[in-house]
Amino acid sequence: MIEKYVGHTVEIIYFDSKGAITQRQIEVRSIKGAAVKAYCLEQHAPRIFRIENILAVMPVVRKRFG
């Protein structure tokens, strides 16, 4: 499901390492096996997310002005 978003910004809902449901905006960099390598826009740092813990993915649409 998330494979088609490599190179794009998406919003995900997922289970974090403590089992809490969290929502984040990430830039998907690559997918290796069962892991999504991404840049978290909220933590301002690279992160790895387990695909099995991602509950939902939605593309982020940026508005253009002008």
Image (cartoon, rainbow, N blue to C red):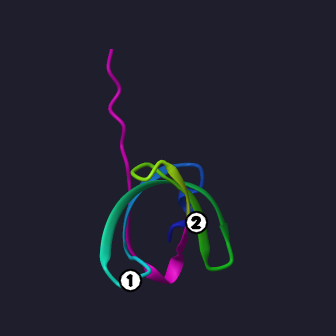
- Which disc number belongs to residue 3? 2
Q: Which residues are magenta?
A: 48-66
Q: Is residue 33 left or right of residue 13?
A: right
**Residue at left offset 37%, top offset 48%:** 60
Distance between mark 2 and mark 1 Cα atoms: 25 Å
Residue 55, horizontal then vertical, whole percent:
37, 77
Under circle 2, the secondary element is helix
Q: How many marks?
A: 2
Do the residues bearing badges 2 and 1 touch, measured as CB atoms within 8 Å? no
Amino acid beneath label 2: Glu
**Residue at left offset 53%, top offset 52%:** 45
Amino acid beneath label 1: Lys
Residue 53 versus residue 22 in the image, above or below: below
Within 10 Å of the Cα at label 2, are there few (<14), some (14-19), or many (20+) other Cα atoms?
Answer: few
**Residue at left offset 32%, top offset 70%:** 22
Under circle 1, the secondary element is loop
Residue 64, horizontal then vertical, whole percent:
35, 26
Which of pointers 2 and 1 indicates the residue nearer the eye? Answer: 1
Residue linked to disc 1: 18
Q: Quadrant of residue 47?
A: bottom right
* Residue 50 magenta: yes
